[in-house]
Each structure stands twice: as structure tokens, then as C-alpha cells.
Image (cartoon, rainbow, N blue to C red):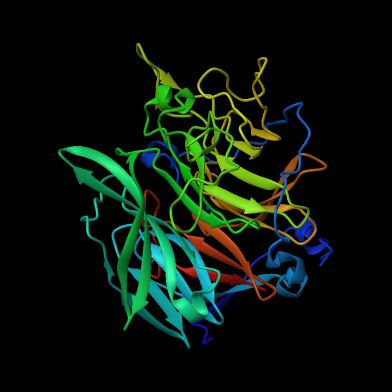
């Protein structure tokens, strides 16, 4: 891959010491806040999920080789990029306003996405989640999460698409009617080690949806890649896998089989009856089958019978965690928007450490072939530079 430019940065020693063992802030209301030094941790210990298949490829990655103290910019002038995927040395990046950017041999090409329902681009809504089919090299299938409108109602849907002659064409609608709005869209897609398709769905600022099992809003959803409800889902005939979330935008399995999800806390959100919530309280959760993570019944370290507490809670300043990626040593990289940094979460120590700062808002992070890739997100609610937004490769 041809590199556009190179810059030296200081990376935290915590990540350099990692030993290999084998994904939007809620609108511009969060952009003025930076990560605070106050960190709270919940009482619940991480619990492993029951992975049906083998752990995903991170076990074979050696990211230490990528951490020599700087980064290279592999793509620039991206327009509100959201999600990173890889096919060999080719990188694909969704843009919230539409189109998927192919980065191949140093060349950037915006590829059209043709869906049967028009893309809705309002606030945080648009083309967001994206994951390639495990057999993409042969079948050219992928899955996208996008906003649309029907009969005046804002909604989201999950669609199977196919890359045909440089155009992503809809093949099948897997799920529609996911609540939509201007904010809290969720939208992260991931294929689990069990071969199932997982999706986060936000509460769209309608907090009551998170506890409503009849609604996909405020949930982690699970389905087959053909859009069917798996027989072993926790609720009969339901895509709901976990609930009580607010605006989760990151999903990742560590090599030990644990599923982690990031979730935006309530900072800046209107309070029913009046006022604005300024408590921060962004979360990292271990996602378990059928678990209830409490929103809006509880926040942060608060708990109650029948609810699952987060494994990490940020302090009173929002970091707005978005995409996450698993490290080979079972630590988790976290892209933060309001926190304006790439961070490293250590589940054993329950700590969050800065890895990369000074590049503004970070939307997504991914590991591929031993290197860490980062998407900046300054063209949405930030202060974009001349080359923003960019795809960075840490080294």
C-alpha cells in the first residue's frame, strides 16, 4: 500500500509492552469535552461469552511490530468516515453521507452503494456499519447498516450487498424498522466467532426503547447472515441478544472469547421533564446472552438486581467511545470522539490509557496483518485539517 505521508508521534508505553498471545459522539454536543482524569470502575468482573466457533484472527496478529512511535497516513480527505474493513491489502471505508471508499495500491476510489431504499443522511444517521462476509474473496458479499425514511418515520435497516463491477448492490434486506432519528443511531456490525452477524442499535434518544424487548432500539442484535433469528437467541423469535444499552458503537471479541461493546453515556442528553444530563459515564461492557445493562434504569456504577454492570465507566467528562478492536493479549483498543484519542482498555486492571492523541476525533480502529489502523472523524463535529479525514496506520 502506497503511503501518503508520515508523521512521528509519541505512543504510550503501555501499548508498546503488550505481548501477543496468538466502532460517533452523540452529535456535536459532545465534541467540546475532553477525556477527564477521573475514572470509575464497576464491581462486575468480565465474563466470557460462549463462543461457538474458534476465536477470530486477532490471535495471529503481532501489533507490537506496528508500535515504533509514529504513524503513516494511507488515505486522506475522507468525508465523515465510519467503519473499516479489509480484503487482503485492500481497505474499504464507509462514509456516512454515502459511498464506500476503496483504498488499494495507494489509490482512493469512492464506490457507489445502491440500495432499494434511499439513504437518509440527517445528524448522525446515514451509512454507518459495514462488515465483509467471511467468504468475501469468493462471493463478494458484505453487510451494511444504513438509515432510511418510510412514511415520514426515521428508521434503519441491515442489508446484504454484493460488490459488482465496483458498485455495491443490494441483494437482500435482512432487518428493517430499526428505530432511527438524528442521534444515538448505533450501527456497528460484526461477524462473531460463531459465524453470526451482530449489530448495535441505539435508543435514538428515546430511552424507553432500551428496556422494551419488542423494540430493536438500545440493543445488541444477533442474526444469521441470511437474516434469520438464531435458534439459540435468548428471546424466542427475537433478534435481541442483549439490551439496556444507550448508543453502542463498538463490538469486538478478544481471543479468549469475550465479547466487548462500547456505549455512550448520557452526557449532554436532554432529561425527560427538563434539563440536560452532564454526567459523562461512558461504558465498556462485557456482552452476555440475554443480559440487561440497565439504561435508563441505572447509570455508570449504579446497579440493581437483574442488571449487568459495566466493566469500565468513564468519569464525569465524556470520552464518547466508538469503534473498538481486540488485542492479542485480550486488551481492547478504543476509538474515542469527545476524548479525541485512541485508548487502550486493560480488563484486568480496569484502566483506560491514551495510545494516540493530537489527531482529533477518532471514529474507528482495527487490527490487520499486525498493524493498527485508525480512522479520524474531524469532518463531523470536529476541527478538520486540510487532509482530514484520514486513515492512519500506527507504526
The relative height of residue 75 versus residue 379 in the rendered view (above or below) is: below
Residue at 37% x, 72% y: name it: 162
Res 334 visible: no
Q: Given the current orientation, which residue lies at the most extreme left position?
A: 151
Q: Quadrant of the N terminus?
A: bottom right
Q: Quadrant of the C terminus?
A: bottom right
> Relative to 210, is 134 on the left or the right?
right
Question: Observer-nearest residue: 259 or 266?
Answer: 259
Which of the 4 quarters of the picture holds residue 110? bottom left
Number of residue marks: 0
Q: Position of residue 266 (x, y in %)?
A: 49, 28
Q: Position of residue 365 (x, y in %)?
A: 57, 60
Residue at 48% x, 41% y: name it: 239
Q: Given the current orientation, which residue lies at the most extreme top position?
A: 273
Q: Position of residue 150 (x, y in %)?
A: 19, 43
Question: Observer-nearest residue: 213 or 282?
Answer: 213
> Relative to 375, is 66 on the left or the right?
right
Residue at 34% x, 49% y: name it: 157
Res 134 visible: yes
> Relative to 311, is 88 on the left or the right?
left
The relative height of residue 277 versus residue 389 in the rendered view (above or below) is: above
Q: Position of residue 262 (x, y in %)?
A: 58, 43
Which of the 4 quarters of the picture holds residue 107? bottom left
Residue at 66% x, 27% y: name it: 308
Amino acid at each position: 500500500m502506497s503511503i501518503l505521508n508520515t508523521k512521528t508521534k509519541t505512543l504510550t508505553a503501555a501499548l508498546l509492552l503488550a505481548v501477543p498471545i496468538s466502532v460517533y459522539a452523540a452529535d456535536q454536543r459532545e465534541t467540546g469535552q475532553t477525556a477527564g482524569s477521573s475514572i470509575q470502575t464497576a464491581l462486575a468482573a468480565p465474563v466470557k461469552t460462549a463462543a461457538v466457533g474458534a476465536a477470530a484472527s486477532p490471535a495471529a496478529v503481532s501489533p507490537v511490530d506496528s508500535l515504533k512511535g509514529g504513524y503513516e497516513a494511507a488515505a486522506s480527505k475522507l468525508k465523515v468516515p465510519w467503519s473499516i474493513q479489509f480484503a487482503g491489502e485492500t481497505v474499504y471505508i464507509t462514509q456516512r453521507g454515502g459511498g464506500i471508499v476503496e483504498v488499494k495500491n495507494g489509490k482512493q476510489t469512492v464506490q457507489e452503494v445502491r440500495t432499494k431504499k434511499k439513504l437518509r443522511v440527517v445528524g448522525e444517521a446515514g451509512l454507518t456499519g459495514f462488515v465483509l462476509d467471511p467468504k468475501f474473496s469468493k462471493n463478494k458479499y458484505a453487510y451494511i447498516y444504513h438509515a432510511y425514511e418510510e412514511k415520514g418515520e426515521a428508521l434503519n435497516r441491515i442489508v446484504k450487498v454484493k460488490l459488482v463491477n465496483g458498485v455495491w448492490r443490494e441483494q437482500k434486506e435482512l432487518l428493517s424498522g430499526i428505530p432511527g432519528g438524528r442521534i444515538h443511531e448505533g450501527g456497528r456490525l460484526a461477524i462473531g466467532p460463531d459465524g453470526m452477524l451482530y449489530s448495535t442499535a441505539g435508543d435514538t434518544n428515546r430511552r424507553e426503547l432500551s428496556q422494551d424487548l419488542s423494540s430493536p432500539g438500545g440493543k445488541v442484535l444477533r442474526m444469521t447472515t441470511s437474516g434469520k433469528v438464531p435458534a439459540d437467541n435468548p428471546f424466542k423469535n427475537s433478534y435481541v441478544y442483549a439490551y439496556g444499552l444507550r448508543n453502542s458503537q463498538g463490538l469486538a471479541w478478544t481471543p479468549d472469547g469475550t465479547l466487548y461493546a462500547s456505549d455512550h453515556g448520557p452526557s449532554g442528553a436532554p432529561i425527560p421533564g427538563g434539563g440536560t444530563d452532564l454526567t459523562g459515564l461512558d461504558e465498556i461492557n462485557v456482552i452476555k446472552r440475554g443480559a440487561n445493562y440497565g439504561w435508563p434504569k441505572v447509570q455508570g456504577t449504579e446497579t440493581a438486581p437483574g442488571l449487568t454492570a459495566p466493566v469500565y465507566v468513564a468519569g464525569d467528562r465524556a470520552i464518547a467511545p466508538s469503534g473498538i478492536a481486540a488485542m492479542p493479549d485480550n486488551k481492547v483498543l478504543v476509538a474515542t470522539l469527545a476524548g479525541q484519542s485512541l485508548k487502550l482498555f486493560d480488563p484486568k486492571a480496569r484502566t483506560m490509557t491514551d495510545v494516540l492523541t493530537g489527531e482529533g476525533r477518532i471514529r474507528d480502529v482495527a487490527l490487520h496483518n499486525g498493524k493498527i489502523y485508525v480512522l479520524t472523524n474531524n469532518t463531523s463535529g470536529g476541527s478538520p485539517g486540510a487532509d482530514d479525514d484520514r486513515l492512519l496506520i500506527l507504526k
